[in-house]
Amino acid sequence: MAQWTILLFSLYGVVHGQELQLPTVQECCKDGRDRALGGQDCTILPLISSAHICRIAQEQCCAAAARDQLCDNGIKMAREQGACERPFFQGDPWETKISKTCCDCCMFGLMTESQGSGCELQGLLLGRRCTHTAKTCCGKNTTEEIKPDDLKKETEMPEANVTAKPPEGLDTCKDSTCSQLCVGNGTCACHDGYELQKDGVNCGDVNECLTNRHNCVGGQVCINTEGSFRCQRETSCGTGYELKDDNSCYDFICTNTVGSFRCHPREKCAGGFIQDAAGSCIDINECVAHTSPCLPGQTCINTMGSYTCRRNTVTCGRGYHLTHDGARCEDVDECRAGNVCGDHGCINLVGTYRCECRSGFLFNSITKLCEDINECRHYPGRLCAHKCENTEGSYQCTCTIGFKLSHDGRNCEDVNECEANPCSQECSNVYGSYQCYCRRGYQLSDMDGITCEDIDECALPTGGHVCSYRCSNAPGSFYCTCPPTGYTLAPNGRTCQDIDECATGSHTCSVSESCFNIQGGFRCLSFTCPPNFRQASWGSRQDASVGVRCIKACQPNDINCNLDPVHLMTHTSLSLPTFIDFSQP
């Protein structure tokens, strides 16, 4: 469109030899806004002027219009659906982000108004756009779509001369003579754009252009209308266009004539169509061109030259459900819908919920459950002296074998196991355990370490040397024995001593026999003198020796006997052992 406009301007300048009039900043801004509302990308706008200021105004006004349109989508979603999830919006991520932000801010305003908190939002630093959107939705809680121009007028236009309506049921304006509004007790008021006259009944138009209550910008002229005003730009549309009351430029078709040309209005298109730059009638997408052509809860479907409205099949996101009329989604109060948190507390949030967990539990935002905190794993070595066992919502300290839990429930103290008499004989308590001991003659069992078993001293490697004759085992000890005859046990209890039967007189020798002691018994000996000898005397029986003395006694006339040098023979026997002192050979 702009390219055709520039071409017409150029032709006109060539024919008439005059300078081409450049568009104003207001025209550049309007061109950008129109292209944004037509769905054109604001980053690839065609140039309509070589002036840099025009380029800036064109791009920024286009971007502002695009943001306003995206914000309108968010406000519409908040009022109609009550849900602001980003998947509900179409477009690039930056577009859905703007729509969701305005939707959230509008929902904030609607919820603030429903709670009766007022729409001033004092002390909340929400940002200018969010604060403005929240206040607008809070102060205008209807399903009517709010346009950016309307939002601007609501903040800049003076308040109407209307006071609060009287309570229902009190009709104090019956038979009122007010020309416009009655606010009770016969008091009259006027609509926006009017003011009450001195008679207190009639309303007169307010000239916003004279009272400076308009919002026309530079390059526009304020024109007063009945009950309102309009802003008309000061500059014309240029050759080939006609300026309309709505500040739009109506295009003409140039028809060449001999020596000149004529401008004819373009052929008007039927309803639902609009002319393109070439003059052809193209379909208007009412679903895009109009803010909300369908009722809430309906979807707009464009058709050739018109559009239809189809009832929405609303799919609510998680945490929302359809209202009874099926027109929008509203939050589900999960805390009332079911026992979602068990025996924990429950807090409902918009679109979700949160569990207030008891001590010892932690809320998992993914599973939406209160999960037990394993204190033993979170605080290793800091809770219990020995062992820590996790329990549901808490923990418990335990001790190793040989210890018991102290009164503080955390430390461990030694157990005196000997008090329970675990050993068969002697017990000694040690830190964390105990030790069994045995008395002399017993040894600790290798099987259980508790029982004391008798030591068989006779079976030890040195057992054969304990007793001189025979070793007999006894519980915890032993004793030595000797042969049944001829020996007696010594005072040391181990050695066997020989019994001297000859000395004790316990022998059985006759009078003519001599008693000779031997180890373990005795012998009876009989000594006789050889021929030519006679017995002279007997040895003492009290000694340990037995002796017989034979003296030479030759027969008469026995020369050989007399010549024999042997005159004395002595027979001596010594008992063994003997303690006789031999002083002579």
Image (tube, rainbow, N blue to C red):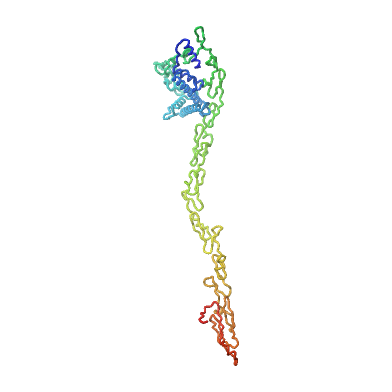
Relative to 267, is 374 above or below? below
Residue at 60%, 93% (x, y): give it: 557
Quadrant in the rendering for residue 558: bottom right
Towards the viewer: 281 or 244: 281
Relative to 336, is 245 above or below? above
Q: Position of residue 290 (x, y in %)?
A: 51, 20
Towards the viewer: 474 or 545: 545
Q: Position of residue 102 (x, y in %)?
A: 48, 27
Q: Position of residue 540 (x, y in %)?
A: 54, 83
**Seen from this angle, which residue lies furthest top?**
258
Q: Is residue 120 left or right of residue 313?
A: left
Towards the viewer: 236 or 289: 236
Q: Position of residue 259 (x, y in %)?
A: 50, 7
Towards the viewer: 12 or 565: 565
Relative to 466, is 574 above or below? below
- Can the viewer see residue 398? yes
